[in-house]
Image: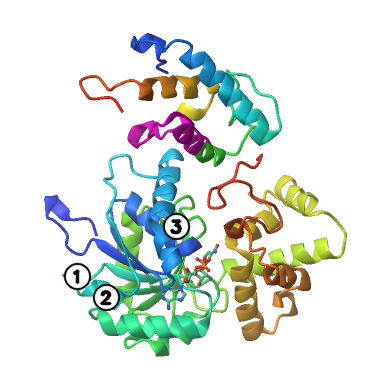
Amino acid sequence: MTTSSDRAVPETAGGSDAVQAELLRFLTARTRKPWTADADLFASGGLSSLFAMELVVHLERTYGIAIRGTDLRLENFRTVWRMAALVDRLRQPAPGGRGE
Amino acid sequence: MAGQNGTPDAGRWLAVLGAGVMGTGIAALAVGHGVAVTLVDVDRSRLDAAPASVDRQVRLARLMGALPPEAVPGDLVTGLSLAELSTVAATTPAAVIEAVTEDPDAKAKVLADVSALVAPGTPIVSNTSSIPIDELAPATARPVDLIGIHFMNPPYLIRTVEVIRGPRTGDPTLERVRMLLAALGRDPIVVDDAPGFVTSRILHPMINDAVRVVAAGTATVEAVDQLMQGCLGHPTGPLRTADLIGLDNLVDSLWVLYGRTGDEGCRPCDLLLELVRAGHLGRKSGRGFYEYEGDRHEHEGELS
Ligand SMILES: NC(=O)c1ccc[n+]([C@@H]2O[C@H](COP(=O)([O-])OP(=O)(O)OC[C@H]3O[C@@H](n4cnc5c(N)ncnc54)[C@H](O)[C@@H]3O)[C@@H](O)[C@H]2O)c1
């Protein structure tokens, strides 16, 4: 699993932490259960995998990103860490491309 | 279906009639497999909502790993009638699939119109849950071209489909439908014609019974679903399934079954009828046996 840090993309100050905190709040409110940033949301006893679509919509609306193509993989939404890493990466201008 | 050796295949598009729960789901299945779709509905508001709904479902299918990663999404065109759109499209579709309201008269009308429009040999497919295919056949100009494909809901997440071969369905029609389903990554099980075929004949009265159990006060909605899931391995529980189907569609289908079998188990029970009268149609209206918060067209985050 690639994270934003080992991809050597510049870290937005506090971005990842703030995103993680916000996601944990969202999950707790939405599922009425406490979560940790490294918990596997879709492990047995966890959330239905269909909930991942709600996470996609939430991330897009909250962070103004578009999650498309090969980024639409359940693996990217399995933990709060991975979602925060995805948000960080998609908020960066693509290498050689232009930003949002 | 697929163009061989890179030859562009002009027939690689589908016409889907009815942009409700199933029409948009079938469109998403096709678009996600790289097949272009022309989607028709008589209701302007349904039509306006359709592109976003199809897009969301394609993304859900991709997220679930249910689409071939290399497929380039097919185009989606929407319109109020196939006749209006046919003047634009130069080619004939690979098939026409009707997924309009479960009402024999409405379906007969749509099938008559469609069979007058498309070239002979084009499979005309009904996605009916319960109406016998042979009962719809006289409405079409060519009963040999008519066949049933009972896609499950959601069509892009459930691979197995029930294919209904009516007594007048032609062999070439069945063959073309097999090719179409192969291109869409679905696995057909071919059965004979009967009210409700196999899946609805078994599932719909079972759901009706589950509602009766709740109405009798024997157990709560949650308890019924938990028992059917935990003890009997039902994937979602009958009442959550009812919400997914749409309670109005379920009632329509039960009436079709009751009228053709006389089986009292198929007569829609009072609680089901009351919910429909109150406009509680399940997921699509935001409330049925369960409540669905937020965007009512999204698959909600129930605990599994
Ligand atoms: N809901 C399910 O789970 C499910 C599963 C398998 C099969 N089916 C079958 O699929 C069909 C559609 O069911 P649904 O749940 O999508 O219903 P729905 O009520 O969600 O949608 C039906 C759509 O058909 C449209 N329509 C009605 N008459 C029309 C016409 N003449 N031309 C074009 N559009 C027209 C309506 O405006 C509506 O948008 C039914 O035959 C149903 O039995 C449903």
Magenta range: A55-75
Q: In the rendered structure, the residue with mark 1 lies on which chain? A: B
Q: Which residue is mark 3?
A: B25
Does the segment drawn in magenta span residue B65? no
- Given contact means CB atoms under 8 Å apart, are the residues at marks 2 and 1 in contact? yes
Mark 2 element type = helix
**What is the spatial separation of the Cα atoms under label 3 and label 2, in whole angstroms?**
23 Å
Q: Earlier in the sequence, mark 3 or mark 1?
A: 3
Q: Quick check: is the Cβ at mark 3 less than 8 Å away from ligand 1?
A: yes
Q: Quick check: is the Cβ at mark 1 less than 8 Å away from ligand 1?
A: no
Q: In the rendered structure, the residue with mark 3 lies on which chain? A: B
**What is the crowding at mark 3: few (fewer than 14 residues within 10 Å), some, or many (at least 20)?**
many
Report the side of A33 relative to B61 (left or right): right
Question: Where B265 falls versus A34 (above or below)?
Answer: below
Residue visible at 30% across and 74% down? B82
Q: Which residue is mark 1?
A: B88
The number of callouts visible is 3
